[in-house]
Amino acid sequence: MNAYLEERRYRIAVWIVIASEALLFAGLFALYANYRTEYPHAFGEGVQEDIQWMGGANTFILLTSSFMIAYAIHLMRHGRAAIASWLLIGVIVCGGAFLVLKLAEWGQHAHEGIVPGIGYYTGTFHGRGTVLFFTLYYLMTGLHALHVIAGMFLVTWVFLRVRARTITPERHMALELVALYWHFVDVVWVFLWPMFYLMRV
Amino acid sequence: MSNFWNEPRGLKSWLLTRDHKRIGVMYLFTVIVFLMLGGAFALILRLSLVEPNNALVSAHTYDRLFTHHGITMVWLFMIPSIPSAFGNILIPLMIGARDVAFPRINLASYYIFVIGAITVLVALVAGGVDTGWTFYTPYSAASATAVTCAALGVFITGISSILTGLNFIATVHTMRVSGMRWRDLPLFVWTIYATSIILVLATPVLGLALLLVGADHAWALGIFDPASGGDPVLFEHIFWFYSHPAVYIMILPGMGVISEVVSTMSHRKPAWYGAIVFATIGIALVGFLTWGHHMFVAGISTFDAGLFGILSMMVAIFSAIKVFAWTSTMYGGRITISTPILYVFTFIFLFVFGGMSGVAVATTSLDVHWHDTYFVVAHFHFIMVGGTLTAFLAALHYWFPKLTGKMYSEVWAKLACAAVALGFILTFTPQFLLGNAGMPRRYATYPPQYQWLHVLSTAGACLLALGMLTVLLYLIVAVFAGTPAGDNPWGSKSFEWRSPSPPPHENFPAPPVWNTRTDGPYAYEEET
């Protein structure tokens, strides 16, 4: 089989995975849209409860990481593998920072008694729909965090391969495909950010 | 002679194989086991319905039986039956490839399927599920049965589906023998390709729906619970967004099998190749937009219901294109009357009647009367189960010599085909009448005036079971004592028959060569 088809089949596979994942999130987005329409007040209140600066900081962190991985590909194409690998470290650090902030926010909510399941404390909230908001909040940010973790493993794998020189300026498809996935994880967050931190009313 | 069955040797070489034919064969055995299990559940249900007051099993057991009948047949038999078993065996052969694009992912998908199936069986052993195969909320969140375990099992089989679909799409895109264009693909490959698109796009949504139900059941998240403001109908939307396209996952590969068998047995190229491809892709795409017809009485607006009804009827147009194409291929052809073509006739009969009753239930005004009655049960068994099962049996008989190099007994095969066809029609025709007379689905007992129809239906089910067991027996005999079939017993032009039967480890002893004009899958000499 020629190299073109070899590369093409991996590309197709990653795009299919992304399409599949997009549909996975689409179900949750549909739930959010429906319930937000039904309970606009409760959802607005829920958004105010989320810690805005953490959401903003996380957006900044992920966008930075996406820039770094894109720049890593650019450098790789120009034969500067060593600097590219340092940028990959930066991507992993960003992913870690994102998760730390996310955990801190979950911890804060849990501290206030907003825990999924039977133990929801919704005393300070008004009206129906609050439970739905927080269930969706935990589900969607949780599922997204799992994707960040998966992405960090993939970036680490690519980093090790760059260091081992099995990803080279001549053959760096794996780096491009992992970057594609990382951008996808980033894009999902770009949608979650307004849904859980910005749309206050 | 060395072929994929005996080379390499040993159990380990089978369990860790990356050969698409071996993986396909393992899928084939696995789905046949689940076909028998699901069939056994159905038989117990039918036997208990002989008496109006159901002396055989308790009402609760009855609920669990029909639930597991549905789960087993839908997710453990019909979804993987033709795509994962025959698709795996045939796609690389049909396009002249050594294997699928990702052989290791292919093996992984098989084991993931097995793990999912075992999880479902664990749920069965742990007392079973009584929600119906659709896991409708809010009951599924409250039911005291093993909902979470079963939902998790189905979710895991979904991962296997996605990986299989991914593999087939990448294979068709990149592994075709040099020179083979898209318009040269056998129609079976087209249908598997269309099915794979549904698999990768719809399955994640089902996975999500079932995870939410499982989580709801386990931890009371309340996402579909009216008590916390949740909307149970929303679950139905998300569930059917997958589960309606899923019926096309079941029927499209079946249609592909029918196209192959019709062409080979009529010794002609298929009429309207382009139209069949168009209809195949059309069904796959429009199939995503019809899910709402499951909810005509669940409180969706009249406008939505009308729209979903019209979109659903469009599927009938695509299906009709195919039926006309098959019949015009056969019309005037020199048809070899063999067992596979008899199953094709059965398929077309069931498909036409099932399809027409489908247009009827897509009509909102009529569906209000038929919803949740035996009419719907009869409709989807005719079209979805009848279609998949007869196409599966057609495939099994048509490619049996390809797989084993042996031929089964035609006499027994034709007798069994008659039993399956008559048994199937006898089982479900009375159910149309029952439903129209008002008999609701999923009830363990019924008023005595329905009894004679139920007895007829049960008699049909017994005949069907007898036919299926006969198939199993003579095929097992044929594996060991069948007459040698030769490499291409049907005289097919399709690529998969150009390698020896059974094929060697990497399919083609010499790299296959493709010349569009002479080597097309349907390059039959036109008789004038």
Image: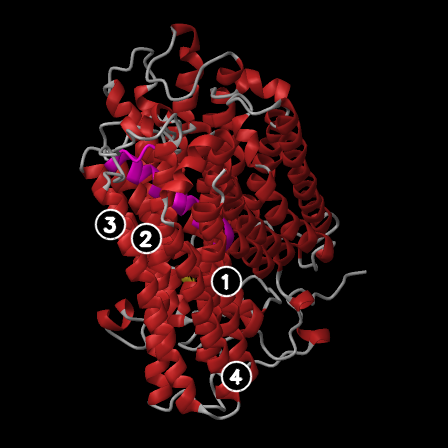
Query: Above or below — where is A172 with respect to B200?
Result: below
Q: Say which amino acid is labelled 1.
A: Ile
Residue B49 can be seen in this image: yes
Can you identify the residue that label 2 sits on? B30
Give the letter of the chain under mark 1. Answer: A
Question: Is residue B504 or residue B196 the one in the foreground?
Answer: B196
Instruction: Write down the region rendered in magenta.
Output: B200-223
Q: Nearer the viewer, mark 1 or mark 3?
A: 3
**Residue at position x 49%, y 73% in the image:** A67
Question: Which of label 4 and label 1 is nearer to you?
Answer: 4
Image coords of residue A149 (percent x, y): 32, 64
Q: Nearer the viewer, residue B398 or A108?
A: A108
Confirm whether circles 3 and 4 share one chain. Answer: yes
Q: Residue at x 36, y 18 (%)?
A: B443
Task: In the rendered structure, find residue A107 and report the number of the disc placed on it.
Answer: 3
| Number of numbered discs | 4
Q: Amino acid at mark 2?
A: Thr
Residue on which disc 4 sits? A74
Query: Disc 1, disc 3: CB below 8 Å?
Result: no
Disc with the residue nearer the chain's start (1 vs 3): 1
Q: Label 4 sits on what residue type?
A: His
